[in-house]
Image (tube, rainbow, N blue to C red):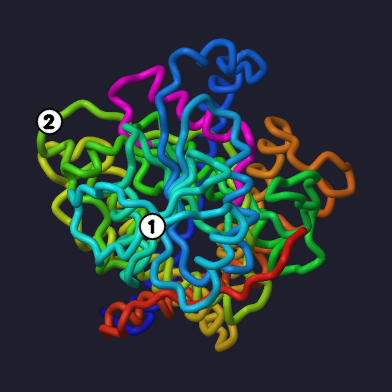
């Protein structure tokens, strides 16, 4: 094969790759829009308390906390204000070196109690268990440091109820969130896991751990992430639900059937992406056993969290996410194209491998190669325009369609100027931001390939209220 033929083949490869990449996301948007329409028709939020009050399953809310003294009080108060018939909040202090435990003691009147603690999942030692004198449904586990997954496993050991919800310590839930998140478990007993929507609290007015008024941040990076989260959660995940092929439930907000998770071995403490790894493992395990199950997502239970507002923190976050994705897929490789894999193994898993895990190689490589070919005169202006229409134009269509569908469905940001601003950001993010995120993901992929040690970085916390 001649050099010219190789270059031509590369041009066609990158053109086709970007076409299938964005077409795949647009297909998920299409599936999500139909699912969303059906969901909204069947949902009547105002009647949910009356319909489900006597049927609600009790829930244990697990809050792993490591050096969260700045936000932990507001986060716990937001959880204690949830409108739900029976729930407990278990905060797991994972060997914090700051005043996290002292803040909890002073804010909630904690008292050390002798309590039986059944170890079903191996964890680092639990040093003490505290109960709040003010709130009977609040307990705090103080344990040696073992990471987020280890903390969640300790919380599962202490949980008294059949369902548990993992919530990040820097996050806040809408008061109705748990009531909405539990709905699939009531409608279908096969449900073993359900995820909700994570939205960004940057720019919102917060009081007492509750978002009082939604708003948009002045920081451009945070604005880009608002559009990105909207696309990823509301449509990127909702689109997989009709296929029962959802592989990701955010560790910041997910509800699980406790016994099913315990039988699967709990969270793996030796991976970065413990949330996705657990969900992929549940698919692999339950399909191998031939057990009927459902892993789903509901779009309106909202968890509010803080987005990074500087490039260094954002880069560390995306590097961790990319490494977590790779670990989750590689540790459950037997699911792909397995005899009992179904749509998760034959469609969702390959999609994640080729378009998400290895995607940064092709995305960054495609932009670099096509730009080089155009500069040296190998690629014609017409071919370059066609490539940009596929790589960027379809991306603009994806972002704007996601925003418009969200605006039609939930209208989170009530002011017209907010919608106009987000529409502009949805267009602008395709000209630099998405390419930068691909670079960060490529860096994470290369780190994992060359064996760099996985670790959680620190988030620069800011008060959002």
Image quarter (top left, top right, bottom left or bottom right) of the N terminus: bottom left
Q: What x and y, as percent, mark residue 254?
A: 43, 43
Q: Residue at the location (35% across, 61% down)?
A: 128
Q: Is residue 306 left or right of residue 327?
A: right
Q: Tell me where residue 295 sits by quadrant.
A: top left
Q: Residue at the location (38% across, 63% down)?
A: 142
Q: Is residue 398 visible?
A: no
Q: What x and y, as percent, mark residue 452?
A: 31, 85
Q: Residue at the location (19% across, 52% down)?
A: 119
Q: Residues within 10 Å of mark 1 (few under 14, many from 20)?
A: many
Q: Is residue 262 left or right of residue 463?
A: left
In the image, which is nearer the foreground, mark 1 or mark 2? 1
Q: Which mark is residue 178?
A: none
Q: Is residue 84 visible?
A: yes
Q: Which residue is mark 2?
A: 290
Q: Residues within 10 Å of mark 2 (few under 14, many from 20)?
A: few
The tag earlier along the polypeptide, 1 or 2, is 1
Q: Which residue is mark 1?
A: 141
Q: What x and y, as percent, mark residue 17?
A: 42, 60
Q: Secondary structure at mark 2?
A: loop
Q: Is residue 134 left or right of residue 354?
A: right
Q: Tell me where residue 272 sits by quadrant.
A: bottom left
């Amino acid at each position: 094969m001649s050099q010219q033929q190789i270059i031509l083949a590369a041009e066609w490869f990158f053109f086709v790759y970007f076409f299938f990449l964005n077409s795949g996301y647009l297909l998920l948007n299409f599936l999500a829009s139909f699912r969303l329409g059906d969901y909204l028709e069947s949902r009547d939020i105002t009647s949910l308390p009356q319909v489900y009050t006597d049927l609600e399953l009790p829930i244990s809310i697990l809050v792993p906390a490591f050096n969260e003294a700045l936000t932990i009080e507001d986060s716990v108060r937001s959880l204690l204000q949830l409108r739900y018939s029976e729930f407990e909040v278990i905060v797991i202090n994972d060997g914090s070196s700051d005043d996290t435990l002292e803040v909890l003691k002073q804010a909630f009147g904690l008292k050390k109690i002798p309590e039986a603690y059944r170890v079903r999942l191996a964890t680092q030692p639990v040093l003490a268990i505290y109960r709040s004198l003010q709130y009977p449904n609040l307990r705090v586990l103080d344990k040696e440091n073992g990471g987020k997954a280890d903390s969640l496993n300790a919380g599962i050991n202490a949980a008294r109820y059949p369902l548990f919800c993992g919530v990040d310590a820097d996050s806040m839930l809408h008061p109705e969130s748990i009531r909405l998140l539990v709905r699939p478990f009531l409608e279908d007993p096969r449900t073993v896991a359900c995820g909700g929507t994570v939205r960004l609290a940057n720019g919102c007015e917060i009081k007492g751990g509750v978002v009082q008024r939604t708003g948009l941040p002045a920081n451009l990076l945070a604005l880009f992430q608002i559009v990105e989260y909207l696309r990823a959660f509301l449509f990127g995940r909702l689109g997989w639900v009709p296929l029962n092929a959802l592989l990701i439930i955010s560790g910041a907000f997910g509800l699980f059937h406790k016994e099913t998770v315990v039988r699967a071995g709990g969270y793996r403490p030796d991976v970065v992406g413990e949330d996705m790894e657990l969900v992929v493992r549940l698919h692999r395990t339950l399909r191998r056993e031939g057990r009927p199950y459902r892993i789903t997502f509901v779009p309106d239970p909202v968890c509010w969290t803080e987005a990074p507002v500087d490039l260094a923190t954002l880069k560390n976050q995306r590097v961790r996410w990319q490494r977590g994705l790779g670990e989750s897929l590689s540790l459950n490789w037997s699911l792909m194209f397995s005899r009992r894999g179904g749509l998760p193994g034959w469609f969702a898993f390959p999609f994640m491998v080729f378009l998400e895990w290895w995607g940064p190689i092709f995305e960054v490589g495609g932009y670099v190669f096509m730009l080089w070919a155009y500069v040296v005169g190998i690629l014609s202006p017409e071919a370059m325009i066609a490539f940009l229409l596929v790589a960027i134009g379809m991306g603009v269509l994806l972002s704007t369609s996601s925003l418009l569908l969200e605006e039609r469905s939930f209208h989170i940001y009530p002011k017209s100027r907010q919608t106009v601003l987000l529409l502009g950001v949805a267009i602008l993010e395709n000209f630099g931001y998405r390419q930068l995120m691909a670079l960060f993901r490529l860096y994470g992929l290369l780190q994992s390939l060359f064996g760099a040690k996985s670790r959680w970085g620190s988030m620069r916390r800011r008060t959002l209220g």
